[in-house]
Amino acid sequence: MRHPDDHPQPPSTSPGPPASPASGAFAPGAQTRDDRLLSALLTTAFVVLLAGALLRYVLKHGDSDRLPWIVGLSVVLAVVQVAGQARPGSRRAGRVRLAVVVACWVVVVLLAPSFAWCAVPLIHTALRLLPTRSAVALVTALATLVVLAELRLADGFDPNHLLLPPVVAALATGVFVYLTREATRRQHLIDDLVRTRRELAATERREGTLAERQRLSREIHDSLAQGLSSQNMLLQAADRQWDTDPQAARTHLRTAASIAAHGLTEARRLVHDLAPADLAEGAGLAQALATLAARESRDGLTVRFHAEGPDTHLPDQVASALLRTAQGALANIREHSGARTAALTLTCLDDTVALDVADDGRGFPAPKPGGTRDPLGDPDPLRGHGLPAIRARLRQLGGTLAIESTPGEGAVLTATIPLTPATPPAP
């Protein structure tokens, strides 16, 4: 038997997209601000449609014996829906509230078919809370009940009563599923990009750690290790001359103590900022090289220093690299070449700075391009670090290293660093 309720005008509806990729049945997650806004919109729409349907029923059927039931169920529906918006709770609690609302709504629609269009917000809520198949099944059931309610209200057959509810439900479901799956794909892409960025950052950190270890090894070799090597040679000489020439032995001991003091200063400087001690307190490269030449002029080796060109203030990295180069070269000259004299020549041009280290020692065959043998290093692989360390340090600044030597005629080492920005060559 058809209820005497007149046919109500269906409200204008639109399916609307999901609040955010993080919400919904297809991409569960914590609620965002957009999720809360969408929930508030759905709750408001449901309460407004519910109030409109109830007001219409009271105006048209205020003397019906069904009125108390309809009013009571409407209040229950409004309270449950508003309470769910005020305290969202977990996904499971939301599904329980949805079940209560749908059950009460079904009873109300069976009593008064004009409440049928309250199903539109319920369709969106179901799509957001339930898995895909469960949501589609519930939406189909809701749309079917709306069709039956519309047919009960119609005075005659109207195709819109049969087609409009399923079309609205299908559009809402299709658009929601499409947008949510697109959001899921975008989220997967973002996750891949974040993971790739983290892997790249980890790789860069590993490479930076390795580069820092190599740099520290060069710094230690050119300062502490060379000083300890010189001390060892002086102490051995003092031990040999202790009985025959005590004065010379004491001279060697004093020199070794001086080197030890300088090594201690170097160690403290390395710990502080890894800058050479001779460059501390604003000393320029020329002054530092002159100090180095004076300190290394001992035990039969005379080291001279000469500067050419204007007194240019060099970048700290350039000055440090050239000073370390001079320290390493002189240490190898003293230990391996048998030279009596050595010369340090610093040449500063507008766009280039060069350091020449020459000696009159026994020399060596010039290394072949691409060769791995270090002519300035120690034959012991556990000790030798000379030429590769010098070359690597210069390469980091875009510089080059050239060596000229002939057996019996000494050697000349030339380190050149550009002062204009340059791209360092690939290692």
Image (cartoon, helix red, strand yellow):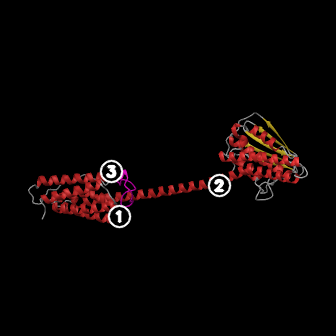
Residue at position x 38%, y 58% from top? 178
Residue labelled with disc 1: 132
Q: Magenta residues?
A: 17-38
Q: Residues within 10 Å of mark 2 (few under 14, many from 20)?
A: few
* Residue at image point 28% right, 64% down: 138
- For the residues marked 3 and 2, what is the alpha-carbon distance in whole angstroms? 51 Å
Q: Is residue 372 left or right of residue 49?
A: right
Say which of 423 and 242 sits in front.
Answer: 242
The relative height of residue 25 versus residue 211 in the rendered view (above or below) is below
Is residue 174 found left or right of 419 in the rendered image? left
Question: Type of residue at label 3?
Answer: Leu
Of tags 2 and 1, which is closer to the observer?
Answer: 2
Residue linked to disc 2: 210
Task: Residue at 18%, 54% (x, y): give it.
Answer: 53
Q: Picture coordinates of residue 381 (x, y %)?
A: 77, 59
What kind of element bears circle 3?
helix
Of label 2 and label 1, which has the lower sequence position? 1
- List the single residue furthest toward the left: 63
Q: Disc 2 marks which amino acid?
A: Leu
Residue 346 appears at what percent x and percent y?
78, 39
Mark closer to the observer (3, 2): 2
**Numbered-mark total:** 3
Q: Secondary structure at mark 1?
A: helix
Residue 23 magenta-drawn?
Answer: yes
Whether 35 is drawn above or below 100: the answer is above
Tell me the mark number nearer the camera, choosing from 1 and 3.
3
Q: Main secondary structure of the magenta part?
A: loop
Query: Which numbered dot is residue 37?
Result: 3
